[in-house]
């Protein structure tokens, strides 16, 4: 077997991990040399970092609440459509059952029949006439 190729493959596998760490260290040391990162400065920036994290949490919570509200609105609109269709069907059924012919059919088993002779008007004559 080729031992040179095996050793080169091992080195290539180790390079990305080592190179990433080295570049991060170089970057941090460069910032430290410039004087941007200091222990005191980190302590002063800590409350602001917590504030930013708190804002991020509020933003995430706000998006969850908005999604929940949208779902509730959608569910309510579906319920309203369903109730509206039920209202229309019940209203049409009531209109049908309140017709004179339907009322006559409904009360026929009770023994109440529809008049075939029109009612007579009773006129009382008073003493003045």
Image: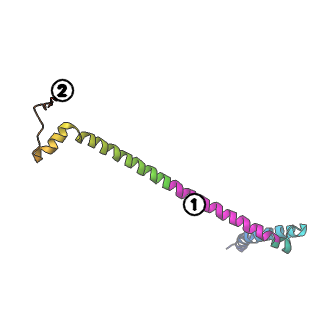
Marks 2/1: CA distance?
86 Å
**Residue at the far right in the pictured view:** 34
Q: Which residue is mark 2?
A: 128
Q: What secondary structure is found at the residue carrying circle 2?
A: loop
In-front residue for pair 75/19: 75
Question: Crowding at label 2, few (<14), some or many (≥20) Cα neighbours within 10 Å?
Answer: few
In-front residue for pair 108/35: 108
Q: Which residue is mark 1?
A: 64
Q: Is residue 62 covered in magenta?
A: yes
**x and y percentages locating residue 21 in the rendered image:** 77, 71
Quadrant for residue 57, please give it. Answer: bottom right
Display colour scheme: rainbow
Horizontal side of 71 relative to 102 (left or right) equals right
Q: What secondary structure is found at the residue carrying circle 1?
A: helix
Residue for point 70% across, 70% down: 13
**Residue at the far top in the pictured view:** 129
Q: Which residues are magenta?
A: 44-71
Question: Crowding at label 1, few (<14), some or many (≥20) Cα neighbours within 10 Å?
Answer: few
Which one is closest to the eye, mark 2 or mark 1?
A: 2
In-front residue for pair 77/12: 77
Quadrant for residue 9, please give it. Answer: bottom right
Q: Taking 107 as reference, is 56 above or below it? A: below
**x and y percentages locating residue 54 in the rendered image:** 69, 66
Horizontal side of 117 relative to 25 (left or right) equals left
**x and y percentages locating residue 48 in the rendered image:** 77, 67
Magenta span dominant secondary structure: helix
Res 92 label: none
> On the rendered image, what quadrant is the C terminus found in?
top left
């Amino acid at each position: 077997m080729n031992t040179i190729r095996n050793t080169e493959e091992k080195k290539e596998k180790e390079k990305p991990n080592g190179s990433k760490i080295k570049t991060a260290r170089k970057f941090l040391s460069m910032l430290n040399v410039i004087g941007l990162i200091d222990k005191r400065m980190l302590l002063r920036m800590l409350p602001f970092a917590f504030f930013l994290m708190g804002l991020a949490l509020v933003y995430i919570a706000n998006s969850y609440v908005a999604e929940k509200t949208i779902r509730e609105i959608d569910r309510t609109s579906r319920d309203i459509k369903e109730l509206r269709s039920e209202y229309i069907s019940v209203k049409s059924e009531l209109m049908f059952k309140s017709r004179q012919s339907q009322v006559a059919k409904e009360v026929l088993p009770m023994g109440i029949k529809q008049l075939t002779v029109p009612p007579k008007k009773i006129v009382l004559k008073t003493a003045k006439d």
